[in-house]
Image (tube, helix red, strand yellow):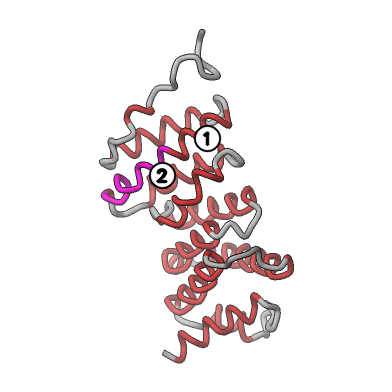
Amino acid sequence: DDAKRLGEHLAWLYVWGAVPLSPDGPWAGFLAGAPADLVRIAVGSVGRGLLHADKPIPTEARQRLESLWVARITALSERPDLVADELGEYVWWFASKQFDSAWAADRLLEVAALRGGLPANHGLLEVLPALAPEIPDRAALIIREVARGETDPGLLSYESSAFRGVILAARAASGDSAESLIRDTLGLLASRGCTELLDLGARPQGTTGDPS
């Protein structure tokens, strides 16, 4: 409808620098006054657009989006009634790989803290194994937040191969630093019915941190 299209239009005008984030601007006014579902749709449209972009967005656009992401986390931390509506859409922003991986992982973990975990979003779990060697401890934390936050246990089992890829990559890259977290995450996944990863509960003999 018209309100939905307006939100998406304003969101992309902001991305490309045509409207500011200043309090008296139309985009900030939309974020502050529109129904939560329309804000969620606008934020999600940006995330999906970033995900399907065929090249990195310009630096200025990325910086504007970084400012918006931080601003929305701050705003929503004061509005817990709106958290679940909007914050889940930022998973798409992370999955787009348009941001510095460590920076975006930290923002995603802030999202998880506010909303009580993360959804088992296929876009997220598709890119995370490849990013895990670069950000092993953060990747392990993100997997834990998915295990904590996904409301459909069946999806956790469905995505078990992605979890396996992240855990193996994080173990290889981090040595022992993520091991306690990985074991806790494996236990949480198993408690929620995802038993496909029980073979990963023990670190293979001869790897870093094992007694020889």
Res 28 → quadrant: bottom right
- Disc 1 residue type? Ala
Q: Which of marks 2 and 1 is nearer the N terminus?
A: 2
- Using the image, tell me which numbered label, if any, was put on residue 162: 2
Outermost residue on the front side: it is: 54
Q: Distance between the residues labelled 2 and 1?
A: 12 Å
- Where residue 41 appears, x then y in whole percent? 46, 75
34 above or below 142?
below
- Using the image, tell me which numbered label, if any, was put on residue 170: 1
Res 198 → quadrant: top left
User: What span is colored magenta in the figure?
Assistant: 154-164
Nearest the camera: 69 or 100? 100
- Where residue 174 appears, x then y in whole percent? 58, 30
- Where residue 100 appears, x then y in whole percent? 66, 53
Nearest the camera: 50 or 73? 50
208 above or below 4?
above
